[in-house]
Image (spheres, helix red, strand yellow):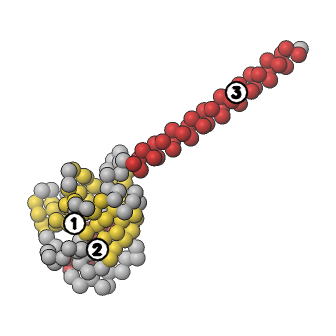
Amino acid sequence: MKTQKFKQKNVSQIKTHSTVICFLLAVFLVAAACEKEKDDNPLMNTQWKLVGVFDTETLIKEFEPHNCATCYVLTFDNDTIFSGYSSNRYLNGRYHINYTTNDMSVLMYPLIQLDEVSLDGYIYIESLENVQSFSLSENMLRLYFNKSNYLLFKSVES
């Protein structure tokens, strides 16, 4: 009888230890996956200057003013925060990327467009608000705001 209680106690302890080990392993794997995703963010700590709006590969529009160093620049400060400028105002907000599908969403705040001095500024902000996906190749970033139209950015060397 004593031996049977001893065996039941050992089996119970083994099950408890196994459950704890499995739980800790699962936590470790999830944490490692999250950390890997953050480390793999190719946009983090990068800066981009707008080239123009494109339809497939055809330039539709270049934004004015051309000679403004800060206009139409986006900076991805970390894995969720961005900042930048339109034609004449500071922008900031949050972004989220799904690396599996290349989906992207942008939330700008506070969004008050009343002080834009140009139609280009309004178009730029509206396009950013509607970003659905992205693609990144070498030093070019495409932010798609519908299936075929995108904002094309060139990397700014830091």
What residue lies at 26% left-to-right and 80% top-to-bottom?
88
At label 3, which amino acid type do we have? Answer: Lys
What residue lies at 56% left-to-right and 37% top-to-bottom?
26
Quarter holding the N terminus is: top right
**Does residue 130 appear in this view?**
no
Q: Are marks 1 and 3 in contact (CB under 8 Å)?
A: no
Q: Quadrant of residue 109?
A: bottom left
What residue lies at 15% left-to-right and 62% top-to-bottom?
54
Q: Quadrant of residue 97?
A: bottom left
Q: Is residue 138 above or below residue 48?
A: above
Q: CA distance from mark 1 to mark 2?
A: 10 Å
Q: CA distance from mark 1 to mark 3?
A: 58 Å
The residue that mark 1 highlights is 49
Bin the neighbour count of mark 3 within 10 Å (Cα to Cα): few under 14, some 14-19, many 20 and up. few
Q: Which of the labelled discs sits on residue 126, or is there none? A: none
Label whose residue precedes the other's in the sequence (2 or 3):
3
Residue 104 image position (x, y, % from top left): 34, 57
Residue 57 image position (x, y, % from top left): 12, 56
Task: Residue at the far front: name it.
Answer: 158
At label 1, which amino acid type do we have? Answer: Lys
Q: Horizontal placement of 27 versus 34: left or right?
A: right
**Does residue 92 appear in this view?**
yes
Label whose residue precedes the other's in the sequence (1 or 2):
1
Bin the neighbour count of mark 1 within 10 Å (Cα to Cα): few under 14, some 14-19, many 20 and up. many
Q: Secondary structure at mark 2?
A: strand
Q: CA distance from mark 2 to mark 3?
A: 58 Å
Q: Secondary structure at mark 3?
A: helix
Q: Which of the labelled discs sits on residue 15, or is there none? A: 3
